[in-house]
Amino acid sequence: MSHYPAIDRFGVIGNLETVALVGMDGSIDFMCFPSFDSPSIFTKLLDQARGGHFRIAPVLNEARHKQMYLPDTNILFTRFLSAAGVAEVSDFMPIGEDRVVRRAKTVRGEVTYRMVCAPRFDYARAPHRVHRTSDGVIFESLGPTPVSLRLRASVPLTLDQGDASAHFTLSANETATFVLEFATPEGESPSAQPHYGANAFKATADFWRAWVARSTYRGRWRETVNRSALVLKLLTSDRHGSVIAAPTFGLPEELGGVRNWDYRYTWIRDGSFTLYGLMRLGYTEEAGAFMRWFEQRCDELEPDGSLQIMYGADGRHQLVEETLDHLEGYRGSSPVRIGNGAWNQLQLDIYGELMDSVYLYDKYGQPISHDMWMNLHRLVDWVAANWRRPDDGIWEVRGGSKEFLISRVMCWAALDRAIRLARKRAFPAPLARWLAVRDEIYTEVFTRFWDPQRRAFVQYEGAGTTDASSLLMPLIKFISPTDPRWLSTLRAIEADLVDDSHVYRYRPELAARDGLAGSEGTFCICSFWYAECLARSGDLQRARYAFEKMLGYANHLGLFPEELGPAGEHLGNFPQAFTHIGLISAAFYLDRELSRGSKH
C-alpha cells in the first residue's frame, strides 16, 4: 500500500462554494470542483496512484515543513526551511471566483522548485486531454460531463501524458504564480491581468479579516473560536445559504474499515446546530441565509408534513449512494462511497433540532414569516402523530430501527419550541393538543427510558447502557443540568463512554448494533458536549480541564476531524463542521460562567 499522509497534515482553503485540502508537502490532494459535491478533480488522498494532485514544492534536502494561516483569514502558507534556503507556497481561493491561486516564493537563498498538476476528472474515472495556451495549458475532461480547466502559469510548462509540470528557480523575493480555473476564451479571465495574483491575495485577505471582525466573541479562547468560525464559513455555500457537514468523502472512521461516508451534504441536524453557533457569534446574516434555506425545505415537505434528514447543498432531495471501486481508499479503507444512503432514513431527532433553531432565530435574528409558520404547523402536527415510531436514531445506525431516547427527547423539543413560538407570536395552533403530546412524551422519557438500577437514562428501553446524545438533554433544557437524575446519568456516561477527555458516541458491542463491521474512534463533538455539560452542572474547573485538553487534539492549524483514533489520530471526514460547532458552544458557555465566577 502506498504511503498516505495523516489526515491532520492538511490545511483547507475555499471560496464559499468548494474547498481544497493542501498538504504540508505543498500538494493539493483533494478537491471537488466547482461545488462541494461536484465530482473530484484531485483525490490523491483516497488513492495515491490514481487520484490526481497539484503539487508545488522546493527541491530541498531535509527541509522542515511548517504550515500556518495568515491570521484571521483562510489564506494558507506552507513553508519549507533548510540550510540551503527558505521557500514558501501561499494558497487561497478568491471569494466568488471559481479558481485556485498558488504562489511560490523564495524567502532566502536561491531555491529550485518542481510543480506538477495532474487532474483526474470525475472521481478519477474520466480520461482527459491537454493542450497548450499562450500562458499555460487547458485540461479537457472526456467524461460524460464536459469540464475544461485552465492552468495559467508565470513559468514555462512541460506536458507529459496528460499532466503539466515545471522546474524553475527563484532567488530571494522572487515569486511564481499559478492559477487553476474554469477555461474561458483567452483574455476573458481576470487572472490574465498582470498583477492578478497580488491583487487577488489582498482582496481575499481583506474579505476574511472583515468577516472575522464581525464576531461578537471576545472571550478566553478567541483565536480558537475564530478559527472554528472560519471553518464553518468555509463550509457555507454563498449561493444557497446551506452549510455542509464536511467537504470530503470516503475518509474512514476506522483505518482499513468500511465506515467511509460522503459528508458533502447538508443535514437538518448539523445545520440546526450550525445556525445556533453562528447566532451566538453574532453572524445573523449567515444565520438568516441558512434560515431561508430551511424555509425552502419546509416549502417542500412530504405530503404528510415530514422532512428528509439531509439534502444536497442546493436543496436537492435524492443523494443516491454508490461505491467507487476503482479507488483504493485512504490507507486501504474501502469501499469509497459517494452519495449517502441515509438520506431516506427516518430520524425523529431532526424535528427538535430544527424547531429549537427556528425558535432561537425568531428570538435573536428576524421574526419568521406567516408562510413558514404554516409549514411548521404541518411539520409539528406530523411529529405529534408520529413520535412513537421506531427510527434510525441521531447517529444514522444501519442495524434496524429502534425507539431511541434522544429521538423522544427531540420530539418533545419540537413540540415545546412550537408551543413557545405560537404563544410568543400569537400564531394559530392547536395548543391544547400539542401540550398534551409534549407532556406525554416527557412522562414516557422518565418512565420507559430511566433505568432505576443504573440510575441513568439509557439509549433505548432496556438497553442497560448510555448514549452520548443524552448529553443534549440539559443543553436543550429537557432536564436541569443539576437535577439528581441528570447528574447520575452523567456519571453513567462517564463510566460507559468517557476516556480521559474523549467521549465515544455509543458502544455498539454493548447496546444497539449499528449494522456495520468494525469499530470507530471517539466522537469529537460529544467530547465538547461533555465539557459543556460539566460546566452547566457547576463543575467549572473540571469542565475547563476537559475542554482545554480537547483543544490539544486539533491539528497544527486548529482544525478538527469527526473522530479521534486510539493514538489520538484524526479519523473521518475533515474538517468536520459538527465538531467546530460543539467547540464554539462549549467555549461560549464556559467562558461566560468563568467570567461570572471571577466577578464574585
Image (spheres, grey):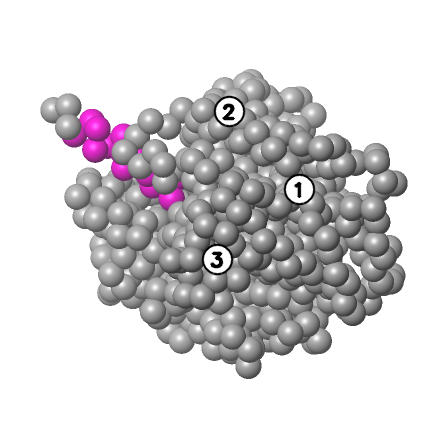
Residue 243, horizontal then vertical, whole percent: 59, 42
Residue holding disc 1: 17
516 shown above or below 119 = below
Q: Position of residue 484 (x, y in %)?
A: 21, 47
Q: Residues within 10 Å of mark 1 (few under 14, many from 20)?
A: many
| 300 vs 456, nearest the viewer | 300
- Which of the 4 quarters of the picture holds residue 14? top right
Please state, as top left, top right, bottom left or bottom right, where the C terminus lies in the image: top left
Q: Residue at x 45, y 24 (%)?
A: 213
Identified at 20% across, 27% down, the residue is 596
Q: Which residue is mark 3?
A: 24
SS for callout 2:
helix
The part of the chain drawn in magenta is 583-597
The residue labelled by disc 2 is 210
Q: Majority secondary structure of the magenta segment?
A: helix
Q: Position of residue 112 (x, y in %)?
A: 55, 57
